[in-house]
Image (cartoon, helix red, strand yellow):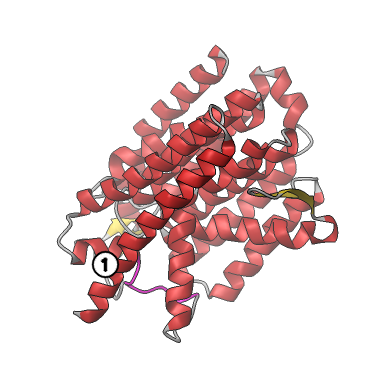
Amino acid sequence: MTPILLAVAAGTLAMSYIAMPMLIRLSHRFGFLDRPHGRKRHASPTPFTGGWSIFIFFWLGLLICVRLLPELKNEMGHYLPSFFVAHALVFIGGVIDDFVSMRAPVKLLIQIAAASILFSVGLKIDTIYIPFSGSYLLGDLSYPVTVLWVLLIVNALNIVDGLDGLAAGLSIIGAIGLLYAAIKLQIPVVAALTVILIAVSLGFLRYNFPNARIFMGDSGAQSIGLIFAVATIYCPIKSYTVAAMFVPLLTLGVPLIELAISFFRRLSTGRSVVRGDLGHLFHLLPRRGFSKVKTVMVFWGVALALQIFVFTLFLFDRRIVFSILVVFMAVIAGWFLFLLKREEQN
């Protein structure tokens, strides 16, 4: 990382941090509030406009970086306009959803359109790596796999935005893992994306940690998801290494696990897989006696543990790392399944 990138990130963090109280006051004044009802059990009406700050200051910071760092402009200049359009599309869709609760098929169509825009300029997944087997070219499957990946990441970040501080903290932790990989693999674009994302997320988290004064809303969760999608697609494009292909799964492990468990839980019980409920793992722990803060810390702890595996991929034999990872994931999954079983029995 260059001093200029760090300086821009520091400035972005400061602007985000300073702007947040003003955004909170304006949201209360104009009634841009998420009011408690149904699944939403927060204590009082809370602004849902945190995603506006995340989107605005992310792009402000990124454009300043591109302006000041010629190598960054040369590297991502071709992708930047399409990235902005795709990001703005998802963000605006999230804003509309925060106001009028958009139907799931419409949200998916918007996300597919954004993924298609990224694919059209070369931001695509054309190779996959299977542990202990090797790398495989996708060929004609590249488009559906790219779209599916974008949908998974955007909705995984969205689904964990159900507890104060959870999504923002997981985003910061995941971005740190990606930043480390970007530095090791010498991918300046991913380094810039993750550093700016960490900055805007930290500025937001100060006011989102329990008890939150502002929520990121769908506009924020989906915006962060698309940034991660672009970063995790770009990483293996520029470095066809095992680490580059596998790191994205580790950095976003917790949101993806939550998404997978929610999908199969709803499917097995005959519920709609796209309709929200109170059966998520971050809902389960408070019902088992955990406070909001302790629940968030548990999920952050698992995410931090996964980042350790990111670091070890660059230090040790990947077969050993994968083997230990399988055992770790089995233990974590077993604990959560045990809690779920106890919940069903009660």
State the quadrant of the N terminus: top right
In this rendering, position of residue 147 left or right of residue 11 = right
In the displayed structure, 95 sits above or below 85; it is below
In this rendering, position of residue 16 left or right of residue 107 = left
Q: Quadrant of residue 15?
A: top left
The magenta stretch spans which residues?
274-280
In the displayed structure, 33 sits above or below 68; it is below
Residue 51 at what x, y percent from top left? 45, 49
56 magenta-colored? no
Residue 265 at what x, y percent from top left? 42, 75
Residue 93 at what x, y percent from top left? 57, 61
In the displayed structure, 345 sits above or below 145; it is below
277 magenta-colored? yes
In this rendering, position of residue 231 left or right of residue 32 = right
Residue 19 at what x, y percent from top left? 38, 35
Q: Residue at x 38, y 39 (%)?
A: 304
